[in-house]
Image (spheres, rainbow, N blue to C red):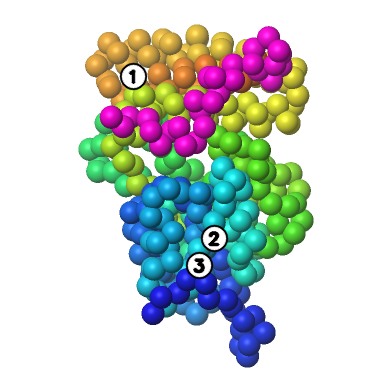
């Protein structure tokens, strides 16, 4: 049976006995990956503790994403919505507008869910009495590939395993929308995702606002997703683009929090750290013929470059606009990096 635009009758007998979780999946031009992701999402365990639906939020794809989502066959409701405004924030907000859930789980189109993923997020929320919970992100790579990349590059590819047990996130770590569960209460309190982040970062902004509003985020290592890594993401060109793009988002977030003077100080601190730490460690990795270490230190230096350039644009926009440079950091441009 195909479930595409089914609606949930929350007033039906027994409908409110258990919570409903809406799994929101923003997507852009990844029809095959989306199909694989949905195959894992419709086979999740619930143990009768909740029900769930899946919302595919298409961010104006030009491939057959619509067909994949609307023709996907499952006993779990899978619904499709279209968003013509570019960016992860608008797509997630479109998914939220269509969702019926008491809770919202966030998942990316290039991921695979383990069978207990959503159940573990929900269990952690209940155990910690938390309204925001994030889980572990493992890379879908071989052990040899992971070892050769090294920890810095694995982190750049979104590997996330900050704690061994159920634990609140520290001040320097936030969940991401690749693996998170959020109560409707949080959105009712602080609003939805910002829509001005053309190159990503709306999740960092949202979870930062949630924590500032008193919603302490918790982490569980038991809620695992596997992040798929296409070959083009293992190229130096992609690591450079990703480092620049991530650093731009960080500088923008910091500017909102600490202003021009604060961003200037943070930028100088990053430059000093690069000169005193990362440049020497890059030389050591090169001498040791450690390709993962070399790429990792280059990644840290590229992040410094991206942060510094964005800081200059924010502090003195007339002198350092760099519009053409920042246009290359759009999320959709990143899809073309490393492809011939």
Q: Name the residue at 33% across, 54% down.
A: 32
Q: Which residue is mark 1?
A: 294
- Direction front: furthest residue: 62
Alpha carbon of mark 1 to alpha carbon of mark 2: how far? 43 Å
Q: Quick one: SS at disc 1?
A: helix
Looking at the image, residue 234 sits to the left or right of residue 161; the answer is: left
The percent coordinates of residue 187 (x first, y second) are: 70, 57
Q: Name the residue at 71% across, 44% down.
A: 209
The percent coordinates of residue 213 (x first, y second) are: 76, 48
Alpha carbon of mark 3 to alpha carbon of mark 1: how far? 44 Å
| Magenta highlight on residue 322 | yes
In the depicted structure, whether residue 330 falls above or below residue 59: above
Alpha carbon of mark 3 to alpha carbon of mark 2: how far? 7 Å
Q: Which residue is mark 3?
A: 79
Give the quadrant of the C terminus.
top left
Is residue 174 visible in the rendered image? The answer is no
Q: Which residues are magenta?
A: 313-340
- The image quadrant of residue 234 is top left
């Amino acid at each position: 049976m195909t479930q595409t635009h089914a609606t949930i009758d929350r007033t039906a007998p027994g409908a409110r006995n258990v919570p409903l979780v809406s799994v929101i999946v923003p997507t852009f031009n990844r029809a095959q990956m989306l199909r694989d992701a949905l195959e894992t999402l419709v086979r999740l365990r619930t143990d009768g503790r909740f029900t769930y639906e899946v919302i595919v939020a298409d961010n104006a794809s030009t491939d057959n994403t619509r067909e994949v989502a609307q023709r996907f066959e499952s006993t779990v409701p899978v619904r499709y919505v279209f968003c013509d405004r570019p960016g992860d924030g608008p797509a997630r907000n479109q998914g939220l507008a269509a969702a019926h859930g008491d809770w919202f789980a966030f998942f990316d189109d290039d991921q695979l869910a383990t069978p207990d993923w959503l159940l573990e997020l929900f269990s952690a929320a209940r155990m910690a009495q938390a309204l925001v919970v994030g889980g572990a992100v493992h890379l879908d790579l071989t052990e040899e590939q992971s070892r050769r990349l090294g920890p810095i590059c694995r982190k750049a590819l979104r590997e996330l395993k900050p704690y061994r047990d159920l634990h609140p996130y520290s001040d320097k770590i936030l969940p991401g929308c690749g693996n998170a569960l959020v109560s409707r209460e949080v959105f009712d309190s602080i609003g939805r995702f910002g829509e001005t982040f053309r190159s990503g970062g709306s999740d960092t902004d949202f979870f930062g606002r949630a924590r500032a509003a008193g919603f302490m985020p918790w982490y569980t290592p038991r809620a695992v997703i596997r992040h798929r890594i296409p070959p083009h993401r293992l190229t130096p060109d992609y690591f450079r683009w990703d480092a620049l793009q991530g650093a731009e988002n960080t500088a923008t977030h910091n500017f909102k929090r600490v202003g021009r003077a604060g961003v200037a100080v943070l930028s100088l601190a990053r430059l000093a750290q690069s000169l005193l730490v990362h440049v020497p460690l890059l030389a050591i990795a090169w001498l040791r013929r450690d390709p993962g270490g070399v790429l990792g230190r280059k990644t840290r230096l590229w992040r410094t470059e991206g942060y510094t350039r964005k800081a200059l644009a924010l502090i003195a926009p007339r002198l350092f606009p760099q519009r053409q440079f920042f246009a290359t950091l759009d999320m959709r441009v990143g899809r073309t990096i490393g492809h011939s």
